[in-house]
Amino acid sequence: MLEVRDLHVRFSQAHILQGVSLSVGMRPLAILGRNGMGKTTLCQAIMGLVATSEGAITLGGERLNGLPPYRIARRGIALVPQGRRTFPSLSVDEHLRLVAVRGARWTVERVYQTFPRLAERRGNGGTELSGGEQQMLAIARALLMNPKLVIMDEPSEGLAPVIVDHLIEVLRALPADGMGVLLVEQNLRVATEVAEEVALMVTGRIAATMPAARLAEDQGLQRRYLGVAAGGH
C-alpha cells in the first residue's frame, strides 16, 4: 500500500530524516521512538507538508513526492496530526459533515455511534471541547474521509486511560474496513496492542523493525531504543 524508500528531509543544515525506508500494507505498522527522532517529520513528509530532498514515497505504486497535500489526501491518505488542529469556528457536527463521503463505510452516524461523547457535544465548537474530545474529533474527521491509509501522529497523547482503551479497539478494527494504519506513538502499550509490527526510529533512521510482541516482552530492547520499560518507574 504505502512504500517509503531511502527518504531524506533537510531543514537548512539539519538532516532530519536520513534514509528512512518502510512499508505499510493491510496490517497496522507502529513507529516508536523518543522525542526529536523525526517521527512527526516523517508523517509530514508523507503528506507533502514538508519537502523531501531524496527518496521516494508511493501509494499503490503511484509516486507522491512533490504533490501538494490536498492531492495526496485525494489519493487516499488521511492524517490525524499531533496537536489535533480542530477549527475553533466550527461545531463538532460541522467538522464531520465537512469531510463526510456519501455512501462510504464511515458516516457521521457511525462516528456518533463509535464516539458517543461527540454525539453529546455535536453543537459545541472546537475550542469548547476537552483535549480528549478534540482528539476524538480529529480521529473521526480522518476516518470520515474513508482513506486507503490513515496516519496517526500520537493519537493517545493526553487521553484518559479509559479513552485510550476505546481508541485501541477502534484502531484494531480499521483493517476490517479496508483501511491501512501507520501509527506513530510514544505509548508502548498502544503501539504494541494495535500493531503486529513495530519500527523503532532513532535520530532520523529506522534502527530496527520487529514483531510488536517481541518488543512488548523485552525490557532490554525497550530501554535501548525508548529509554523506558513497561511496568517500570
Image (cartoon, grey):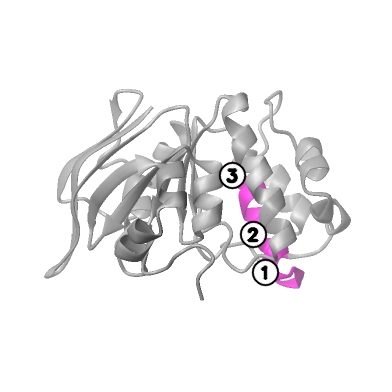
Q: Nearer the viewer, mark 1 or mark 3?
A: 1
Q: Secondary structure at mark 1?
A: helix
Residue at mark 2: 135
Please state if 101 lies on the left or on the right of 91 as rendered: left
Q: Position of residue 182 (x, y in %)?
A: 45, 42
Q: CA distance from mark 2 to mark 3?
A: 11 Å
Residue at mark 3: 142
Dot 2 amino acid type: Gln
Label placed on residue 131: 1
Q: Position of residue 186 (x, y in %)?
A: 46, 61
Q: Are marks 1 and 2 in contact (CB under 8 Å)?
A: yes
Tell me where the magenta segment starts and ends, as one range. 126-142
Q: Nearer the viewer, mark 2 or mark 3?
A: 2
Q: Residue at x 56, y 24 (%)?
A: 178
Circle nearer the N terminus (2, 3): 2
* Residue 133, magenta (yes or no): yes
Placement of 107 over or under 218, stated as above or below: above
Dot 1 amino acid type: Gly
Q: Quadrant of residue 129?
A: bottom right
Circle nearer the N terminus (1, 3): 1
- Of 51 and 6, the residue lying toward us: 6
